[in-house]
């Protein structure tokens, strides 16, 4: 085991809506503009913010989720993403100490900061307070001695006088002010029912938004002091995570030719995926080929398996439905028994219809938009054998959608949900594994190897 010196900051806030995405993304872009290789990370299961982080840094945005992957994988996954970088910025989730419901600090920004031994920069919405800011910052700084708050960035400050009052108050809290962002200069990033609109749907406008965040942060923050704070972090103990199976020197390649070709859905309708999934598939010997179901009328030549992750098929239902040749190709692949792994949006795409529009018809189920948000972590166990998991395999997942599928489970369900929300959900039929559950395969890399082997032999 080695220790790796990676300068790093965790950007956190007392609550959601304080401006941490603007600050974190702006910091990433500002440091990158200074010529630093910046490694972007996001605490929690969020898929959308990492897209903006990638735009800001030119590197893959990666998630650090202690519930999905376990606390023991946080440092290895961080080191994997930060390999070769000069500095890392980690955007937190919700409030600093908020984590998985009923699980204490598990999956909180505070826990990740402690696991990484990283200093925290607290972004505070100061728009409706002055001297009280000192009590708030003091409380957050003293709540957990294991969390080191190295500085504060004040957001939505109204005037020079307001800034003066805030600084005077914080002098007594002993936490330095490392930036002040004015209320009069908002950065607009459009949202809808599941958060920010993904980069893939508005790349030109998103590029402008990231540039505006960088300009705001550069003008209002002490970048030199923030970089110096990042460099106070001690070396991260441990080795980087690797998608290559233990004991292997490289990707598994079968004798006599290339591995199976696995098509992975992408484009604006299917933007939710973890980078580690394709890395694991490749390390297991697969040839991974991305494609866009909105624009391509057939699967890549030689497709032996299909992965359809999360996203917004409800937004693009008309376009997906109009692509009849591809829908027919997916149905034909499923009928052949080829492995198909579908999560959330992928589940909807495999249904008979979505909001009355024909989909692939692989599953005898219908999907529709609802007003109800389903959100939360899940502890799951594979009910039976599938192309993705052997019966009894335990994985933790996350649900995040405003849709409903009827029925919610097939004759052979994908997962049994444990705990308070006991139920079965999803569908397993022939090579298909379809579910609402988003999982992180780094926590159970055997699922990727199993899927590739099924693609090789089906």
Image (cartoon, grey):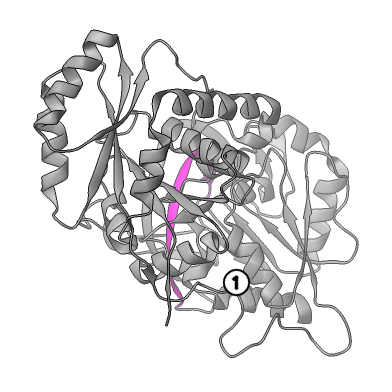
Against 61, is 151 above or below?
above
Left/right of residue 418 with respect to residue 252 in the rendered view = left
- Residue 163, percent from left and from top: 24, 16
Against 23, is 145 above or below?
below
Q: Can see residue 140? A: yes
Q: Looking at the picture, tell me which residue is in the foreground, 131 or 450.
A: 131
- Residue 276, percent from left and from top: 58, 63
- Estimate how packed mark 1 is, as few (under 14), some (14 to 19) or many (20 or more) residues with alpha carbons within 10 Å: many
Q: Looking at the picture, tell me which residue is in the foreground, 120 or 193.
A: 120
Left/right of residue 322 with respect to residue 269 in the rendered view = right
Against 421, is 184 above or below?
above
Q: Looking at the picture, tell me which residue is in the foreground, 399 or 189.
A: 189
Residue drawn where x is 51% and y is 27% of the image: 213
Stretch of the chain drawn in magenta:
393-407
Residue drawn where x is 71% and y is 83% of the image: 252
- Label count reads 1
Left/right of residue 235 with respect to residue 435 in the rendered view = left
Against 298, is 238 above or below?
below
Left/right of residue 97 with respect to residue 279 in the rendered view = left
Residue 350 belongs to magenta span: no
Q: The C terminus appears in which quarter of the rendering?
A: bottom right
Secondary element at tag 1? loop
Q: The N terminus appears in which quarter of the rendering?
A: bottom left
Q: Can see residue 372? A: no
Where does label 1 land, which residue?
388
Q: Main secondary structure of the magenta part?
A: strand
- Residue 287, percent from left and from top: 79, 69
- Residue 224, percent from left and from top: 41, 39
């Amino acid at each position: 085991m080695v220790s790796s010196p990676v300068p790093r900051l965790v950007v956190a806030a007392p609550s959601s809506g304080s401006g941490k995405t603007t600050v974190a993304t702006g910091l990433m872009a500002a440091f990158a503009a200074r010529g630093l290789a910046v490694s972007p990370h996001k605490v929690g299961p969020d898929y959308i913010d990492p897209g903006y982080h990638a735009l800001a840094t030119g590197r893959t945005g990666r998630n650090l989720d202690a519930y999905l992957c376990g606390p023991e994988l946080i440092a290895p996954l961080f080191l994997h993403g930060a390999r070769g970088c000069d500095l890392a910025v980690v955007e937190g989730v919700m409030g600093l100490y908020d984590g998985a419901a009923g699980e204490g600090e598990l999956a909180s920004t505070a826990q990740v900061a402690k696991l990484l031994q990283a200093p925290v920069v607290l972004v505070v919405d100061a728009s409706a307070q002055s001297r009280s800011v000192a009590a708030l910052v003091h409380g957050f700084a003293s709540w957990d001695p294991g969390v080191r708050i190295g500085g504060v960035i004040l957001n939505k400050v109204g005037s020079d006088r307001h800034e003066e009052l805030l600084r005077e108050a914080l002098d007594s809290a002993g936490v330095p002010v490392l930036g002040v962002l004015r209320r009069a200069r908002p950065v607009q990033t459009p949202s809808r029912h599941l958060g920010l609109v993904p980069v893939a749907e508005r790349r030109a406008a998103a590029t402008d938004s990231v540039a505006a965040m960088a300009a705001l942060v550069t003008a209002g923050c002490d970048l030199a002091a923030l970089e110096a704070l990042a460099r106070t972090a001690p070396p991260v103990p441990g080795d980087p995570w690797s998608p290559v199976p233990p004991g292997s020197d490289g990707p598994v390649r079968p004798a006599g030719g290339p591995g199976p070709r696995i098509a992975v859905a992408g484009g604006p309708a299917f933007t939710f995926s973890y980078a580690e999934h394709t890395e694991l598939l490749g390390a297991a010997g697969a040839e991974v080929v991305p494609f866009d179901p909105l624009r391509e009328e057939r699967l890549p030549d030689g497709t032996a398996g299909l992965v359809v992750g999360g996203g917004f098929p409800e937004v693009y239902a008309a376009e997906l439905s109009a692509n009849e040749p591809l829908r027919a190709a997916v149905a034909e692949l499923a009928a052949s028994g080829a492995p198909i792994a579908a999560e959330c949006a992928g589940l909807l795409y495999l249904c008979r219809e979505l909001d009355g529009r024909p989909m692939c018809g692989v599953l005898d189920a219908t999907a529709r938009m609802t007003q109800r948000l389903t959100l939360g972590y899940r502890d799951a166990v594979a009910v039976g054998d599938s192309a993705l998991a052997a019966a009894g395999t335990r994985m933790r997942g996350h649900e995040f959608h405003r849709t409903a599928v009827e029925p919610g489970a097939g004759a052979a369900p994908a997962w049994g949900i444990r705990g308070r929300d006991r139920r079965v959900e999803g569908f397993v039929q022939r090579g298909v594994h379809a579910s609402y559950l988003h999982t992180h395969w780094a926590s159970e890399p055997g699922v990727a190897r199993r899927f590739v082997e099924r693609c090789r032999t089906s």
